[in-house]
Amino acid sequence: MSKVYFASAKMSALRADASLPAKFRRALAHFPLKAMFEGKTIAIKMHLGFNIGYTTIPPIFVRTLIQEIKEAGGMPFVTDGRGAVPGAKARGYTEETLGARLVEAAGHNERYFVNAPIGYLSLENVQICGEIANADAMVVLSHGKGHGQCGWGGAIKNVAMGCVTHKSRCDIHVLIDTEFEWNTDLCVHCYLCRENCPTGAVSFNKEDKLRINLHHCRYCMHCVNCCPHNAIKINEEGIRQFQAGMARVTKACLDTFERGRILFINHVCSVTPFCDCWGFSSPAIVPDVGIFLSEDIVAVEQASIDSVRIENYIPGSLPPPLEIRDVPGHLFEKIHGKDPYLQVEEAAKIGLGSREYEIVEVE
Ligand code: SF4
Ligand code: SF4
């Protein structure tokens, strides 16, 4: 059973010290920051977003974290992958606002990395960004939200996709092979799937074979839902392989650190259906939950996903063509058709942590 500290976004009184940034600072005090970080360089791995997205973690929380780490004697810097750092200024992330340098994780042009073996299916190895691999310690500071391909984008996704080079990200995606399965025997070529796809991602070639262009796909599941013969399905095996690959890459990245030098923080506020890499934001689909902190990546992810509940869904918050489908499972499975717990399950299987957790709420 792992401990997960929780600072709720709910306020017990109309006072600054009852608000989330104040509770976050108090939650950090529960960790031995001096023992973890004193005299060390600390990579604060964030997803800094893109374009005009505005629902990434607000700078006040990053600044608070940086102040606490510095007070503990650490030397933090904020880092993210290719292309994210230069544009981050426009969204309020600068050395002045955060109190620490912003650094591209694999250097400009992504030439600074170390290779690590993975040995899972086609994924023989990955290139871990040099600034991550060569830091002494890490804080994985993640915005908890939905994700079209993983179901959930939190700490595991932040490490697996964000601490490796673009080339390795592409190699991980190859594990899915294809997101959708099309059963040619069941298909009667009514083309309802093509007509119901809002983005033109579905087409049929000269041989009348279905094609789905994943670059145009918005993971709305209309094609799956509208087929009268269940000829299109999510490729569950491929999705599991993808998530199992992410778990293994996460382990390879975390293994570059000594034990006791990584802290995981999930900021489960502004919970959007899609990842921050889309370059825009849509409304939150549940009320702000709060911040989860743990030294166990599996426990922090399990607790965070558990906290995003269907009963808290805010009607009207999903932008079209997304919708809540009448299928069993988590809220994000109803939206994107992928079980968000798969990555957590796979991470637990390879010993990254425990799915059993105890919540310690910080007032
Ligand atoms: S909706 Fe189903 S049956 Fe109709 S063309 Fe598409 S896959 Fe085939
Ligand atoms: S999931 Fe939605 S966007 Fe993607 S191919 Fe199917 S209908 Fe088109």
Image (cartoon, helix red, strand yellow):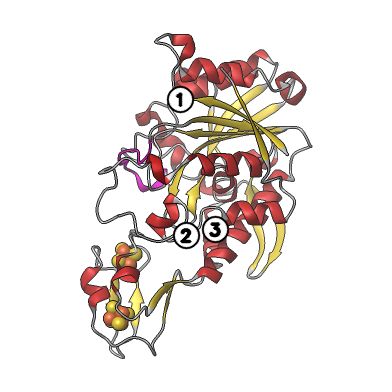
**Residue 349 occupies which quadrant of the picture?**
bottom right
- Whole-Å distance between the Cαs marked 3 and 2? 24 Å
- Point out the tag, 1 or 3, that comes first from the N-terminus: 1
From what the image shows, is residue 200 above or below residue 128? Answer: below
Question: What residue would you read off at disc 1?
Answer: 9
Question: Which quarter of the frame holds ligand 2?
Answer: bottom left
Question: What residue would you read off at disc 2?
Answer: 338
User: What residue is drawn where x is 48% and y is 71%?
Assistant: 235
Mark 3 vs mark 2: give the one in front: 2
301 or 306, which lies in front? Answer: 306
179 or 30, which lies in front? Answer: 30
Q: Magenta residues, as a range?
A: 276-286
Question: What residue would you read off at disc 3?
Answer: 167
331 or 210, which lies in front? Answer: 331
**Most common SS among magenta residues:** loop
Answer left or right for 310 relative to 176: left
- Magenta segment includes 150: no
How far across and how far down the image is residue 279, in percent? 34, 44
How far across and how far down the image is residue 146, in percent? 43, 48
Q: Secondary structure at mark 1?
A: loop
Q: Secondary structure at mark 3?
A: helix
Residue 204: in sight, yes or no? Answer: no
